[in-house]
Image: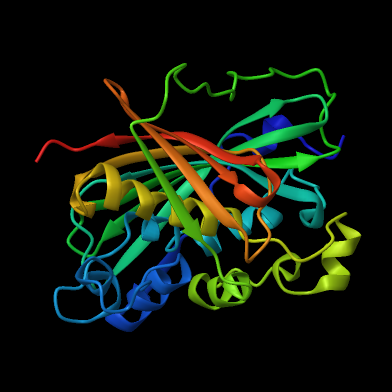
Amino acid sequence: MPIDLDRAVGAPLPTTTYIWTEEDLILYNLGVGAGDPPDDPAELKYTYEQGLVAVPSFGTIPPFLMMMGIGGVGGLDIDLARVLHGDQTLTVHRPIPTSGSVTQEGSITGIFDKGRGALIVLEMVSTLDSGEKLFTNRAGIFARGEGGFGGDPGPSTRRHTPERPPDFTVASATLPQQALLYRMASGDKNPLHADPAFAALGGFEYPILHGLCTYGIVCRAVVETGFDGNPARVDTYSARFTGHVFPGETLVTSIWVEDAGHVIESKAMERDSRVLVGVVAERPI
């Protein structure tokens, strides 16, 4: 069997260090659509050094190299070209500095049999040099073709939206070159997001947008609309990826304010296709 549960579950991921500057943060913010329109003060806080803040989803960037380390974990003999990002949960423990350094430690906390594939769950903690936790990321990586081994199916990942009109609706246009910009901002150089021939091998007509780029665009929409433009109010952001986005499409995000948090659903407007559903929990200020 390609996946050896006894060896893989609990296995540590390679420890990594990530250092960022104000320029790196601005590039990330631009990569998830900030700066439109460029003279809007609400956008300048993401794109100009004076008063600079992070889109909270920046917290997914430091542990990226650690995530890619699953290919070297004993007991995980999987084809990395066939893996998809299934879900992502980010907890932001304290305000994000505009520059800094964190060390990541993490492990594989579970592997579940989803029939058509295996869901590999990673948990990663990013710690500041001071010893304080800055981010905790939990990622679900779906390995296509590796299911059916009779293992625990795990908890359901289905998410439901309220049966009432949303409290807010936000349209976020993406650029035709959005994936090319985000791959430089994030370090995710997967050719699926740049090379048309490679995308065709995966069954896509064009290169698709990174799931975590969609995640960031939606995060910014929630902050600006549901949290009055204050990114410090974001505590935990959990989302499941339900479809792909082609660069140049417009994301329409519906937001419901519920006791458990801001429930979100985002669709690619041009195809009326749901691409992300989740919830953003607010930190009391």
- Label total for image: 0
Residue 105 position (above or below residue 27)? above
Q: Is residue 254 left or right of residue 230?
A: right
Q: Position of residue 219 (x, y in %)?
A: 39, 50
Q: Quadrant of residue 240?
A: top right
Q: Residue at x 88, y 63 (%)?
A: 200
At x 68% / y 37%, what residue is drawn?
7
- Regarding residue 217, the answer to whether it shows in the image is yes
Q: Along the horizontal axis of the image, is 235 left or right of 79?
A: left
Q: Is residue 179 left or right of residue 99?
A: right
**260 vs 163, nearest the viewer:** 163
Picture quadrant where residue 121 is located: top right
Name of the residue lying farthest toward the left: 285
Q: Give the image location of residue 199, x and y in percent.
A: 82, 64
Residue occupying the point 32% across, 50% down: 135
Image quadrant holding the C terminus, namely top left
| Residue occupying image coordinates x 76% and y 35% | 4
203 or 90, nearer to the observer: 203
In the displayed structure image, the side of residue 198 where residue 25 appears, left or right: left
Q: Does residue 99 appear anywhere in the picture?
A: no
From what the image shows, is residue 275 above or below residue 70? above
Q: Quadrant of residue 39?
A: bottom left
Q: Quadrant of the N terminus?
A: top right
Residue 221 image point, x, y percent: 37, 51
